[in-house]
Image (cartoon, coloured by chain):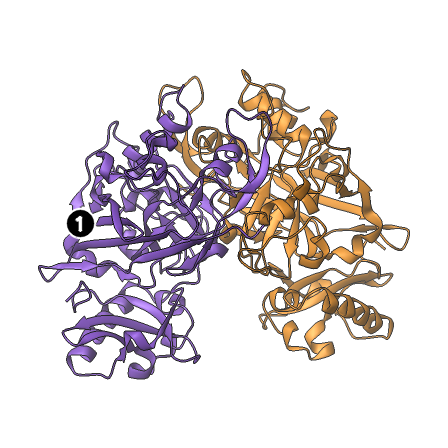
Chain colours: A purple, B orange
Amino acid sequence: MNGFGLDHLPYGVFSVAGGPRRVGVRFDDDEGSWVVDLHGETGRPEFAESSLNTFMALGPEVWRQTRDEVRALIEGGCEPLPLEEVTLHLPVEVADYVDFYASLDHASNVGKIFRPDSEPLTPNWRHLPIGYHGRAGTVVVSGTPVTRPSGQRKAPDEATPTYGPSRRLDIEAELGFVVGAPSELGSSVPVTGLADHVFGVTGLNDWSARDIQAWEYVPLGPFLGKSFATSVSPWVTPLAALDAAWVDLPGQDPEPLPYLGPGATRGLDIDIEVELNGEVVSRPPYRSMYWSPAQMLAHLTVNGASLRTGDLFASGTVSGPEPGQRGSFLELCWGGQEPLPGGRTFLEDGDQVVLRYSAPGTGGGRITLGEVTGRVETARH
Amino acid sequence: MNGFGLDHLPYGVFSVAGGPRRVGVRFDDDEGSWVVDLHGETGRPEFAESSLNTFMALGPEVWRQTRDEVRALIEGGCEPLPLEEVTLHLPVEVADYVDFYASLDHASNVGKIFRPDSEPLTPNWRHLPIGYHGRAGTVVVSGTPVTRPSGQRKAPDEATPTYGPSRRLDIEAELGFVVGAPSELGSSVPVTGLADHVFGVTGLNDWSARDIQAWEYVPLGPFLGKSFATSVSPWVTPLAALDAAWVDLPGQDPEPLPYLGPGATRGLDIDIEVELNGEVVSRPPYRSMYWSPAQMLAHLTVNGASLRTGDLFASGTVSGPEPGQRGSFLELCWGGQEPLPGGRTFLEDGDQVVLRYSAPGTGGGRITLGEVTGRVETARH
């Protein structure tokens, strides 16, 4: 058993030998790893789709019933496909992608590195979960190669910008939240509304070109330094599988405004491992975040912005208080000044990054979210 | 004739009396305003769709042939529908929405207003067309009411932020570019590639809550101050209808990097009128922009970010050098310090804003893009 037991049952999209894409559920047992073909087993049309969106749009009551049904199917002896015989695809047709900045340790570290002469946290940071929109069209499934981006960058000691491949390619180890049930334009989702709208979570690597980002991001925020690729797990873990993972986050000072639900600071006890070329280089703990998922969702919609099925919002880089818990190479090598053992700072061509996630399961053991992998390929131009 | 003659022929999506959505083309003649039901007239399946996306994905050669075919249909006496008998819908299923900041006058004005103690332009501004991703899910068709957003805002003289309806609701008069033909992840579109990918243009009002924006935007850019609504024309004017509108933009200093095509500064001679409650308050000229549409597209993709059919990128606020040419109330009232005649600064509930656009047509007269209207409704909470 490796974290895909009956207490997990994540959803994904697969195909077999060039056939159509279908919705499936993964489970592992003593004999191997399996994918249940949900359309084949149930005949429900929402599973004969190339993404989870149609199913997710049906809402929480259907999600609950389906989870029970899938468990019964497996226990009753359905005929699953061996995992190694299927191809996995991007599970969600991403509508809008929003990335937050919810780790106090990450925001403090980045502030110190990018703006050494200022207070590390901007004055708004403790009052609201800062976020911005990323590029939905370049969200890719785990395993998709990542081409090193080219663009315009200027180091502080250079007089003018130059064009070329990024010299500071980085990762951001994050947790992603997938919206299933939409909301109406002009309305807002209260801080109690997370489970009414969020279908599940995925691992997420928000690949970042720090040199491009540093030159472009004032005043309108990150753009090309982020928009070339964001990788997500092939499996979306339903919120119900994380029932045993909720914990109190460290706390908030000052108390946020009422719409952010002061005290609504329940987070998830998810451990992350960042692996570079087979070696673990960091272990960011999601339970150390400052802003909670419910607060991010309430903030995202407080202005009346509607949610669509397939919206993806992410936590921002997960970094804990210890050096070995930082979720980006920018922080791990402190802006390049403190190379890792072996001399490494940022990513090199050919590097393979794997993000692994685990959490307490409802069955007493641990579940493992779908991993997020990517290999860096040489810039094309 | 009012700018919708045979030299224009913009595309939109309409329905009749609750029937299905269909792709149509508008034209006006001495007897009235008309919509050609393209599916009814041609039987082509890409016109029996609820957006232009399927048609736009077919690429420039099909766009050209179709334009000729539509003109022949009208000249040959098809049976169009009276405009007043149809309902118009959002013409494009928006994939990613990117907003640029391409007007030197606008960026300078905003810099002076938002950051009075700094240089108005950030050091990167003249080196690259600054842009950011906006919320695609809240792009709405002209005529959709705009609910005043609530959120967190803090004036510089307030000690802590408060929650409530925006007190500085504003517009941004912009031009939008609609991508029809996609591009591959990892590749970039050269500065010569505009017409290979961009299907057409729309008017665009990027509604903005300046108080929310001012408090939230450092360091990751605008988010909730913009994400509640962006209005676009119901009609997408194909690039071909603007063949006579290309002009040289004012010029660029310093010369940009080669990927931005130094000298590729052809812009569009489009006049904009901003009307508030029936009175014209500003006339922004699009020909005064600093960065060209071709440069914005080349920059957007230089890092390998792919284009999808339905991507929308906008110019940012169009402001000319004269006070009567500013494309936002923020600038027109100079941050609230210089009210307009009558005492007006920002938008009040019940205000009706109309953006009108006109350009030289290929027939010697002028064409008028689809107007962009919106009425401000009271905040819901």
Task: Work out whether residue B82 can be spotted.
Answer: no
Indicate the quadrant containing the C terminus of chain B: top left, top right, bottom left or bottom right.
Answer: top left
Which percent across, then down, holds residue B22?
63, 70
Measured as percent of width and height from the top left, residue B339 is found at 63, 22
Residue B255 to residue B4: above or below: above
Residue closer to the observer: B345 or A155? A155
Q: Residue furthest right?
A: B364
- The answer to whether A286 appears left or right of B153 in the picture is left
Q: Position of residue B28 (x, y in %)?
A: 81, 61
A342 relative to B12 in the view: left or right? left
Looking at the image, which residue is at 43% across and 78% down?
A: A20
Q: Nearer the viewer, residue B97 or A301?
A: B97
Q: Above or below — where is B373 with respect to A158?
A: below
Residue sitting nearer the eye, B122 or A336 = A336
**Residue A107's image quarter?**
top left
Closer to us: B67 or A368: A368
Residue that badge 1 annotates: A246
**Quadrant (top left/top right/bottom left/bottom right) for the N terminus of chain B:** bottom right
User: Where is residue A292, by image quadrant?
Assistant: top left
User: How many residues crowd around disc 1 within 10 Å: few (fewer than 14), some, or many (20 or more)?
Assistant: some
Left or right of residue B345: residue A39: left
Q: Label 1 sits on what residue type? A: Trp
Which element carries disc 1, helix, strand or loop?
strand
Q: Residue at coordinates 72% horizontally, 29% vertically from top-left?
A: B253
Whether residue B186 is visible to the viewer of this picture, yes or no, is: yes
Q: Residue furthest left?
A: A364
Where residue B255 sits, quadrant-wise, is top right
On what subunit does the disc labeled 1 rest? A
Q: Position of residue A175 (x, y in %)?
A: 31, 50
